[in-house]
Structure formats: C-alpha cells, structure tokens
C-alpha cells in the first residue's frame, strides 16, 4: 500500500481531513439526478460490441438518495480543495447514477470477448469503459469469478483487523501464502517470522494481526465521504489517522513511542513473538473501537458498493486454469480452480 508523502504540509493535511472526515448535510439530496437503466447500459455496450455478440449483465449497482448525496459531496469538496479526482469521477458517477458490468459474449463459443463497465457521466451521457478479454474465459466462469470477487472484496473490507486470520480459508490451500513464493501478495507470511522458533499457529496469528494493522487504513478510508473522489488521498488521510491512534495507544499503555510493533526482524524467540502478538491484539482492538464509533454506515455502505464492482475478468497468461479479476481502484485478484470445484484466491495485490 502506498504511503502518504511525509512532506505534505500542515495546511494540505488539514484540507485532506476536511475533505475526507467531514460528513454533514451541506448538500441537498440529488433526488432528480438521472438513473442509469439496464436498457441504456445495454445500448451503450451494444454500440461498441462486435457484430453478432450477445450481452449479459453480471453485476448492477443501484444508486439511491444516500449514494447520490455522498457522491455529490465528494465531488464538491474535491473541487473546493483542488484534489485530483480519480479517472474523471468514475466512482463518483457510479454513486450518483448507478452502474452495470456487462459481459460481451461470442454466441458460437460462449466465451467472453470483452467486459463493459457502463456508467452515466455528469450531464447524462452514458459511458462505456471497455476491457478486452485476451484469453479463453467462458461466460459461466466469468460469472462465477465476478460473484467470488464481489464476496471476497466485501470480506476484505468488512473483516475487523483483529479477525483477519479468518480470511486464510479463502486462499488456495486454506493458508496465507509464503513470502518466498508470492512476495508481492497481500497477506503473505513474513520470512522473518519463520526464524523466530515460534509454533506454526503463532506465526499465522502474528502474520494475520500484522496484515490487519496494515489494511486498517483501506477500511477506514471507506468511512470517509471523499473516498470516491480520490481513494489514494482518503487512504493517505486514514494512514495518518491510524498513526495518531497508535501514538495514543502507546501513550495510554506507557510504551516507548519509537517501538515498531509491525517489524518482526527483531524477534528472536517464541516468547518475544507471543508478547508481540498480545500487543498487536490490543492495538488492533483499539483501532477497531475507534472505527466502529466514528464510521457512518451509510457512507461505508456506499463506498463499499463501488469497490466491490469488478472491472474485468481475464486469464492469467503464466498458468492455465487461473483467472485474474480486478476491482476499483487498482485491486487485482488471481484465482485458481480447485479440484473440488469453484475458485480459491491465489494472490491479492493492490496499489492505491
């Protein structure tokens, strides 16, 4: 996850906090903002589809008064504070008018030709964001991967940092991956933990608490009204929020403020890792209490709806039987077909 520039000025940071932490009722409900209909979505995709292709709706996001208000607020505040809006307001527009993910299918083979993300821009024009499929993906597999992607993203953003170990069952093999095999994946088990002499269950728990702490800003960003305008800036503000909460936690527990609770390089014994696990449990519980008290369910729900919208499904060119899906803003998921049927996650990467 990308860190916020440490050179950001106090004034700029104050603007970020105003943008991403304030809710309020400064904007009227955008009741008359046009809704994107299925007919409009199909017509827009049909105009860009290959002759003879069929179109299938795989995912729909329905806008309502709350999502439109949150989208309007994000746009207004981003303009006021000169925050660059992600991809010309793509996520904001989905909140304001809804969105559809369509699969363009070759009826002769029932394979996917392309995916079409359909949304409505300001002014009412319908936009088709097309993503070509470069391998053989059947409509049935695409539908399954889209469904699994939606459910996985919901769990990633909804699972408390104290319970991240429960996500391991979703991975291929039922465990978080090893860093030596998938070093760029989220939820890998740091190599330094394996040299501590700790038990396997302690290593897994320490790794889960470690990733729960690191993923907390991404989850906290969803509670910020401006997240749809700029997820990167929202997460940057959330990281500063987490660091401030960590400092408060260390002060309350009379601990050295310079301690790095998520650096395992200094762990040399099982006792040390047990002590670190206990500290991470307490810290993550402290972070969760803060998030639970301050998060507005309406804002979290609206922002969660857009990050669960898959953008594409394709094959992994490096290995047969694997698929790649993506979701906003830049999350990538590598799926593996398991022998018992269905898909399990192999690797997760993102960079806001």
Image: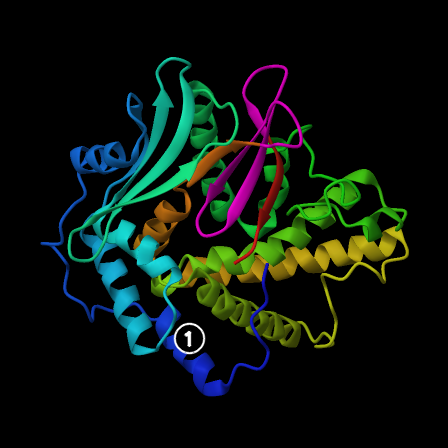
Q: Which of the 4 quarters of the picture holds residue 177? A: top right
- Quick check: is 130 in the magenta stretch? no
Count the marks: how many? 1
Residue farthest along the left direction in this orientation: 32
Q: Which of the 4 quarters of the picture holds residue 175? A: top right
Query: Could you tell me which residue is drawn at 29 percent across and 36 percent down?
Result: 48
Instruction: Describe the colour scheme in one phrase.
Output: rainbow
- Quick check: is 333 in the magenta stretch? yes
Secondary structure of the residue carrying tag 1 is: helix
Toward the viewer: 142 or 297? 142
The answer to whether 215 is drawn above or below residue 74 in the figure is: above
In this rendering, would 143 be left or right of 247?
left
In this rendering, would 317 be left or right of 54?
right
Q: The N terminus appears in which quarter of the rendering?
A: bottom right
The answer to whether 220 is drawn above or below residue 127 in the figure is: below
In this rendering, would 212 be left or right of 308?
right
Q: Which of the 4 quarters of the picture holds residue 168? A: top right
Toward the viewer: 250 or 170? 170
The image position of residue 137, as x and y in percent, is 49, 23
The image position of residue 41, as x and y in percent, is 22, 37
Residue beneath disc 1: 16
The image position of residue 153, as x and y in percent, is 48, 42
The stretch of residues the image draws in magenta is: 316-344
């Amino acid at each position: 996850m990308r860190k916020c520039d440490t050179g950001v000025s106090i004034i700029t940071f104050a603007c970020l906090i105003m943008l991403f932490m304030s809710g309020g009722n400064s904007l009227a409900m955008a009741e008359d903002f046009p809704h994107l209909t299925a007919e409009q979505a199909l017509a827009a995709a049909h105009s860009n589809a290959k002759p003879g292709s069929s179109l299938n709706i795989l995912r729909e996001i329905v806008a309502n008064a709350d999502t439109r208000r949150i989208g309007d607020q994000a746009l207004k505040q981003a303009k006021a504070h000169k925050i660059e809006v992600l991809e010309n307001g793509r996520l904001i527009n989905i909140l304001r008018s809804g969105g559809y993910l369509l699969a363009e299918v070759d009826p002769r083979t029932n394979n996917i030709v392309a995916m079409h993300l359909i949304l409505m821009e300001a002014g009412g024009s319908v936009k088709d964001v097309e993503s070509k499929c470069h391998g053989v993906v059947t409509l049935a597999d695409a539908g399954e991967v889209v469904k699994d992607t939606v459910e996985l993203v919901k769990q990633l953003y909804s699972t408390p940092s104290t319970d991240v170990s429960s996500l391991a069952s979703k991975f291929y093999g039922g465990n978080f991956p090893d860093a030596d095999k998938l070093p760029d994946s989220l939820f890998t088990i740091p190599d330094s933990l394996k040299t501590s002499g700790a038990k396997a269950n302690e290593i897994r728990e320490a790794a889960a608490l470690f990733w729960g702490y690191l993923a907390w800003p991404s989850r906290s960003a969803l509670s910020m009204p401006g997240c749809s305008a700029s997820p990167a800036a929202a997460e940057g503000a959330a990281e500063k929020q987490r660091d401030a909460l960590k400092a408060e936690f260390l002060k309350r527990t009379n601990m050295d403020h310079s301690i790095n609770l998520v650096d395992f390089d200094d762990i040399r014994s099982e006792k040390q890792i047990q002590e670190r696990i206990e500290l991470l449990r307490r810290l993550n519980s402290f972070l969760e209490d803060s998030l639970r008290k301050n998060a507005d369910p309406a804002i979290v729900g609206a922002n969660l709806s857009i990050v669960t919208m898959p953008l594409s499904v394709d094959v992994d060119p490096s290995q047969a039987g694997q698929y790649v899906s993506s979701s906003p803003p830049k999350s990538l998921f590598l799926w593996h077909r398991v022998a018992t049927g269905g898909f399990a996650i192999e690797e997760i990467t993102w960079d806001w």
